[in-house]
Image (cartoon, rainbow, N blue to C red):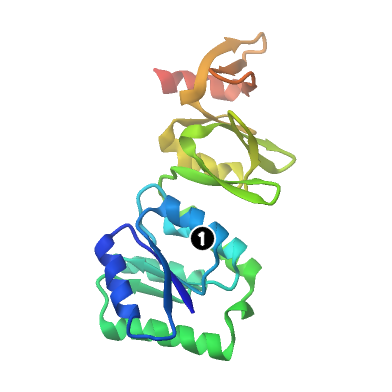
Amino acid sequence: MNVVIVDDEVLSVENIEKSLRAYEAFVIQATFTEPMEALAYLIRTPCDLLFLDIEMPGMSGLYIAEQVALLHAKTRICFISAHEEGAIKAFELNALDYITKPFSKERFHKCIARYLYENGETGAAGENKKARMHALWDVNQTIDYSLDMVCGYREEDIVIIRSSEIYYFETNCSVVYIHTKRAVYRGNKPLAFYEKKLRTHCFFQTHKSYLVNLAKVDYFRPRITYTYDMFFKDIADVVPVSRTKVKELKQYFN
């Protein structure tokens, strides 16, 4: 059975690796200390068991868990954290387990035994994927974290996009589109999710249907209707600023 470990702390990764060597049934498929690299790998490559840290710079383990659950329903996830308060949330997500750092040999064995029992008795695919995705979404909304990159979809391909590459998000017929200089991707979250997670990266909601990276904006042009048009530095697109957002935008720059 193949295992992937994702934790930004090198010592934690090494501790899990060392603990796994006691079990011949498991093969360490890959380890990561950079969440973006881990997500890029996990999008393409399924595994049987994923040890996943929750608190990591630039990307929460919960966001990675959502993408893995969407693409690889059979993967079981054991969350890892230095804080005990996340355990209830982890079980809301129907996670295999939630281990707090530092963990004992006995505690780790309990996690492995649970996985072996589930794999032998019920199978990882026996759970309801749709219910698990809803649970991940609900819990992810309650966690306040900064997001340095997002997943975009282009036909069957999944692309990791850095927030600095995004010009704006647009909602059209309930679908969110992610606009970059070279391409437009489909998002898999509502606009409210991106607004909350990217607000510390100069993203501003100019309209109920638009979320803009202000670092990419060149100038504004007032209209007779007391709204603005927003123009970008490198692309010809024009984004509206609604009347209700004009005052807030001025306050933002002041």
Whether residue 222 is situated above or below residue 113 in the rendered picture: above
Q: Which amino acid type is shown beneath numbered disc 1?
A: Leu
181 or 136: nearer the viewer: 181
Give the quarter of the image for residue 147: top left
32 or 104: nearer the viewer: 32
Whether residue 89 is situated above or below residue 155 in the rendered picture: below
144 or 40: nearer the viewer: 40
Residue beneath the point at 38% across and 66% down: 86
Whether residue 160 is situated above or below residue 82 in the rendered picture: above
* 194 displayed left or right of 88: right
The residue under label 1 is 42
**Looking at the picture, how far across and down is residue 70, in whole percent?**
61, 61
Looking at the image, how many numbered discs can be counted on the residues?
1
Residue beneath the point at 37% across and 53% down: 34
For the question of whether residue 68 can be seen, the reply is yes
Residue beneath the point at 43% across and 80% down: 26
**Looking at the picture, how far across and down is residue 82, in whole percent?**
29, 65
Instruction: For label 1, count other residues whose C-alpha is less than 10 Å away and answer few (under 14), some (14-19) or many (20+).
Output: many
Residue beneath the point at 48% across and 37% down: 163
* 72 displayed left or right of 10: right
187 or 140: nearer the viewer: 187
Quadrant location, the C terminus: top left
* 188 displayed left or right of 250: right
For the question of whether residue 140 can be seen, the reply is no
**Looking at the picture, how far across and down is residue 129, in whole percent?**
63, 69
**Looking at the picture, how far across and down is residue 95, in whole percent?**
48, 73
Give the quarter of the image for residue 81: bottom left
Element carrying mark 1: helix
**Furthest residue to the right?**
173
